[in-house]
Image (cartoon, rainbow, N blue to C red):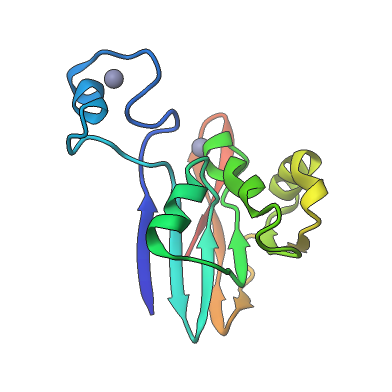
Amino acid sequence: MKITLLGTGDAVGTPKIGCSCPTCLDAIAGGRSRRLRFSILIEANGGNVLIDSSPDLRWQFLKKGIKHIDGLIWTHAHYDHYAGFGDFHRVQNGVNVYGVKSTLDYILNYLYFLKPVRHDVNFFEPFSIIGLEITLFEVTHPPLKSRQVY
Ligand SMILES: [Zn+2]
Ligand SMILES: [Zn+2]
């Protein structure tokens, strides 16, 4: 199994629009401060599982040569964790998406037109994607109760 952190940056990205702090200026100048937003790729058993679909997903996939995923797990319904799902439009249909009911309800109310295959899962109840056993558990992430992957 190989786990790749495609992005671990802040919700607004670095550089932040309109910011002139030293970190953002370094990122704008092409320095080492530039960070993409949150997505993790798990490669195992000949398949790919994505954890969260950041607004930077298109660039993350192009950079790593990712062409297909077998499952997408959404940890929670904050913009920076799901908005890149729209980048699957005309790239991959029928994406298998996983999350707890409240997360899927919120995200798919917006992105329903991509016709994902919805898989509702529950906290602390293991489920399987490409042979990997995955369990979601709750963590405190105000104002939401977030869903993390184990
Ligand atoms: Zn800044
Ligand atoms: Zn969040």
Above or below, 42 against 10 in this view is below
As displayed, is residue 44 above or below residue 39? below
- Residue at 60% of width from left, 53% of height from top? 74
- Residue at (62, 78) in percent of width and height: 128
Left or right side of 135 for 1: left
Tell me the quarter of the picture where residue 146 sits: top right
Q: Quadrant of the N terminus?
A: bottom left
Q: Position of residue 131 (x, y in %)?
A: 57, 85
Q: Quadrant of residue 143?
A: top right
Please state the horizontal and vertical placement of residue 148, each as a whole percent of the image.
51, 54
State which image quarter holds ligand 1: top left
For residue 77, say whether it is visible: yes
Give percent across and percent down for residue 4: 36, 63
Residue 124 appears in view: no
> In the rendered view, does 142 fall on the left or right side of 86?
left
Task: Left or right? Give the position of 144 relative to 27.
Answer: right
The mark tally for this picture is 0
Q: Position of residue 110 (x, y in %)?
A: 76, 38
**Which residue: 18% across, 39% down?**
32
